[in-house]
Amino acid sequence: QEYVVIKMRVKDTSALPDRVASALEEHKDRVYLGAATLRAETMYGQTNCWALPTGEYGAYLMKNGDVLVSGARAIRNMFFQGLVAEKDGEPHCLVDGILGKELFGVELAAPLTPYTSVFVLPLLTIKLDKGTGIVTSVPSDAPDDWAAYRDMQENRNGIAEKHGVKSEWCANPTLPVIKIPQMIEKDGELHDTIACAIDLCEQMGIKSQLDKAKLAQAKQKAYLDGFYKGTMYLEEVRKLGATTLITLAGESIELEGMPVAKAKEVMRDALCESGDAFVYSEPEGTVISRSG
Ligand code: ZZB
């Protein structure tokens, strides 16, 4: 499995717990939360970032001088792939034992999204055996994200209150980025959608992030229809001032209207080229349990 890691920059490291901020002082302009995604083409629609409240994260020095906050398991894979700096034969960890809940409310700058700030919020369904354990949120196209974002905004099941989430941390409106024709069933007819996750959650009666079985089904459908029938739909993003031209190998490429299957590759490559992301692989079907 190849993941794209989106670098979400910590705008002010003094918002991190004191012991973390002081350990990272020397690197404070290059500290990123590393969000693993399979959907680089949706990055214009990022509204926030997710961490697992009880998840354990560390800040690691990368070979290029960046500091990446991630779970230890993904770092080990990146280390084997030559991306992480070494210390005593191990990944160079600057500070470990950072709990997800210590990251809530931290302000980040994320690539492509027209929002100047996105905040870290709690997601209870993050799995520690996948990706970095940090997840970027695109509520328009990921049913899990939409259900959890609405939980935050409306304090459904008391999750937001329990974790001290402030309303200004979940104030970025959801942005459509992909149009899918004839996908959503309503009154016995099929309709186009520009925010398939929202429409799927409504159609399937998904009430919160805790509706796991239905969310798994919705995610499957969103992946399939998005990939095979979706095209980039960036009108609203453009209205907020973002450019929909992306540069790749010295060429400027217009993304509006591009099929998702193609935009996925173009945007992954462009984000990697600009230094806003990088790719790493996870061994198929292997759960590495050593050191977390
Ligand atoms: C942005 C995004 C936009 C995502 C979208 C999905 C969608 P999969 O398919 O099960 O491998 N994710 C990443 N790591 C984790 C984790 N540790 N625990 C829970 N969720 C995680 O899941 C990969 C996707 O799940 C990733 O891609 C990430 O969310 C999230 F429009 O990043 B994605 C229909 C899905 N749409």
Image: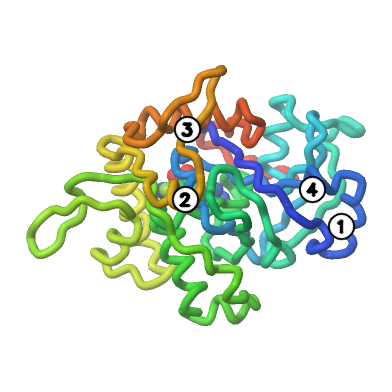
Callout 1 amino acid: Ala
Q: Identify which residue, 53 or 181, lies in the foreground.
A: 181
Q: Identify which residue, 102 or 262, lies in the foreground.
A: 262
Callout 2 amino acid: Gly
Callout 3 amino acid: Leu
The residue labelled by disc 1 is 21
The residue labelled by disc 3 is 245
Q: Is residue 71 visible?
A: no
Q: Tell me if label 3 and label 4 are in contact, CB under 8 Å.
A: no
Mark 4: give few (<14), some (14-19) or many (20+) Cα within 10 Å.
many
Pick whichever of labels 1 and 4 is earlier in the sequence: 1
In 3D space, how far apart are the residues under numbered discs 2 and 1 (Cα atoms)? 29 Å
Q: Position of residue 251 (x, y in %)?
A: 51, 19
Q: Position of residue 230 (x, y in %)?
A: 29, 40
Camera-near label (2 vs 4) is: 2
In the image, is 105 to the left or to the right of 29? Answer: left
Camera-near label (3 vs 1) is: 3
In the image, is 21 to the left or to the right of 8? Answer: right
